[in-house]
Amino acid sequence: MIHEPCTTEAEVPLKALMVKSHYILPSDDSEITRLNLQNQLLTREVCDGKLIFAPAEVEHGDQVLESGTGTGIWLLSLADTIPPTISFIGIDIHTRLFPQEFPSNVSFLQRSITNLPAEWTERFKIVNQRLLIGGLTRKEWKKAIQEIHRVLVPGGWFQCIEPNIPLKTNIGPHTERMFAAVRDLLAKNGLVHDIVEVLGRKLSKTGFTNVQTHTVSLSAHRHEEEFNHRTLMEWFFLALKPGMLAQKLLQSEEEFGELMQSMLKEWDESPQVAWSWSVVYAQKRENNVGMAKFCIYM
């Protein structure tokens, strides 16, 4: 069934959509491919193949929200595995990456996680979010977590995946320089490089309970698979190149290319090159109500 991305609840006021974007990655056709492959890899390698990693309980009639949905790949994958009596909403401040084809129990809205509708209070059983390290400032993270807590039903779960950006890599000078440029790019846009550490504190302060962090370290060595963690990391740095050049963190395409090649050579020569990712999940305090549980896998 073909649907056009829409605002099904009510027309969104223009003011509500006038949110300054700090997002530092592109939103073109190549990014659609990268995001979809990235989602599959992170689900498989970081979340043990589970689309819902938190010990979430869902039943018929529940609703699921995804913030920063992008291409909607996580939402659509989940919708394909559980009963159609569960409904799904994906939100993003940009519609460029929204899918054009999706089931009738799925909708995509242009919204910011920092400003959700008042009528969504205590509406969703699960809120999912992936990789908004490149999109939310420290102040926006605080507001986003407050909004997520508000729209969750009692006993509902929030889960998100974020990378751990190291302060020191111990790989080599070129790797150190590239990661320093990443941290500087995040800082210049008001973004938070150590968001995994920050999230645990913010979730607890907001009133969440059962706050957990599951961290997995993935090798960045070359691999036979066409798309692997090494590929993901290379694409990630290439996607950040325009921002690095715009902020004069690197002076030219040539300088970036030379740094990239030197960094990858260091990786090939390092026996234990790896980067870690974390799933952070937490529960809104619940009322004791028994519910049926579905285990969701890819």
Image: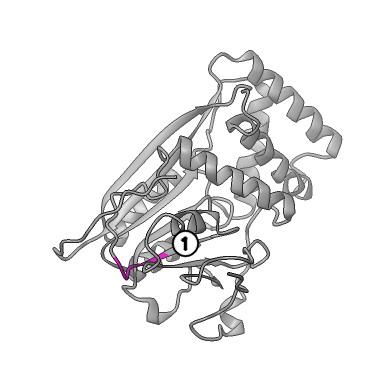
Q: Position of residue 172 (x, y in %)?
A: 63, 20
Q: Position of residue 24 (x, y in %)?
A: 66, 53
**Which residue is painted at 65% across and 31% down in the image?**
226
Q: Is residue 261 above or below residue 111?
A: above
Magenta residues (range): 60-64
Q: Residues within 10 Å of mark 1 (few under 14, many from 20)?
A: many
Tell me, yes or no, if residue 147 can be seen here: yes
Q: Quadrant of the C terminus?
A: top left
Q: Is residue 208 above or below residue 179?
A: below
**Which residue is painted at 22% across and 58% down in the image?**
292
- The secondary structure making up most of the magenta span is loop
State which quadrant residue 222 falls in.
top right
Within the magenta stretch, is there residue 62? yes
State which quadrant residue 265 falls in.
top right
Q: Amino acid at mark 1?
A: Glu
Q: Which residue sits furthest front?
A: 1
Nearer-the-camera pick, 197 or 217: 217
Q: Position of residue 274 (x, y in %)?
A: 53, 25
Nearer-the-camera pick, 247 or 219: 219
Q: How many marks?
A: 1
Q: Which residue sits furthest left?
A: 288
Tell me, yes or no, if residue 204 can be seen here: no
Within the magenta stretch, is there residue 281? no
State which quadrant residue 251 falls in.
top right
In the rendered structure, the answer to whether residue 204 lies left or right of residue 275 reads left
Nearer-the-camera pick, 111 or 166: 111
Q: Secondary structure at mark 1?
A: strand
Q: Quadrant of the N terminus?
A: bottom right
The residue carrying mark 1 is: 66
Q: How is the image coloured?
A: one colour
